[in-house]
Amino acid sequence: MIVAERKPFEEIKAMIEGCKKVLIVGCGECVSVCMAGGEKEVQILASQLRLAFEEEGKKLEAGETTLERQCDKEYLEEIKDKVDDYDAVISMACGAGVQFLAEMYDSKPVYPALNTQFIGVAEREGEWSERCRACSDCVLAETGGICPVAICPKGLLNGPCGGTNDGKCELSKEKDCAWTLIYNRLDKLGKLDNIRKIFPAKKYSVQTTPGRRIHEAFKEKE
Amino acid sequence: MGDSEPKVVAFCCTYCAYAAADLAGAMRLQYSPNVRIIKLLCTGKVEPLYLLKAFEAGADAVMVVG
């Protein structure tokens, strides 16, 4: 899932300076799971903003709604009758959701309430870690299912480097050395020979920006 | 409740704090009427939003007792 965290409150408040009515839109997918931008977080942000404005002697009307997700147009359309009633919209989705919402309602200021961090997994309740850099050229088959691009701070395809230290990274004792993990996993799988393979320079050319994919079935016939 | 008195909302656990308040009542002990009790099955149920909503509703202070 996409992992995000809420921006500092003061930053969000500063974005809507001068607004009297804002619509806060949550997203029911990844950011709900990582407790950053779901229904609960929408309610909390709305309440905090109302209280903060009241403290300054101002009144803020904060509308609250949470969509199934913000990365599909059909769900964004659900708020088309509401948006016009507000001075601005605060999206509590990942960066993709914020942009899609802003694109659909392009005459209305749309502000992000979250900082999107990474594609990751839930290690345990309330803790997530990065697992994928969306590099468009997956090497996990060769590395025992452990990604050196995402987990090695240097993104080395031919590791470990000289900074590996008892299974930890030279950058931080908190970080595991990705290539030690890979070595141990390959050993467990009986595929230790993989470690001798030399990866050629990574094909960054496939990592186009902005990325776009059209499913075969939806490509226009030539 | 006079306007000068602070309004306090107390979220109380039914098994301890609420029982204590109930006992105080049974013993005819007085405690400040400014404290408004909301009984919860467990204070573990308290969500940040409950506290914020209490402030939005005009509370000057919120207690979580459990």
Image (cartoon, coloured by chain):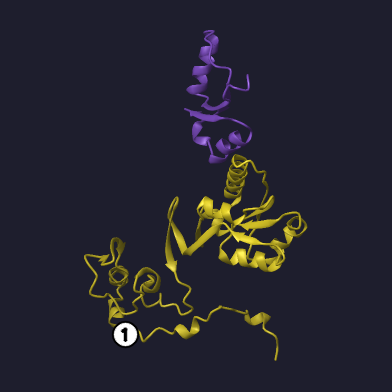
| Up/down of A25 relative to A51, above or below | below
Q: Which residue is mark 1?
A: A198
What residue is drawn where x is 54% and y is 8%? B28
What residue is drawn where x is 59% and y is 33%? B54
A189 or A106: nearer the viewer: A106
A44 or A212: nearer the viewer: A44
**What is the x, y in percent for residue B30?**
53, 11
**What is the x, y in percent for residue B37?**
57, 24
- Give the chain of mark 1: A
**What is the x, y in percent for residue A43?**
61, 46
Placement of the N terminus of chain B among the 4 image quadrants: top right
Q: Residue at the right extreme?
A: A81
Which of the 4 image quarters holds residue A146? bottom left
Secondary structure at numbered mark 1: loop
What residue is drawn where x is 46% and y is 63%? A120
Is residue A28 something that shows in the picture?
no
Identify by letter the chain in purple.
B
| Up/down of A100 relative to B14, above or below | below
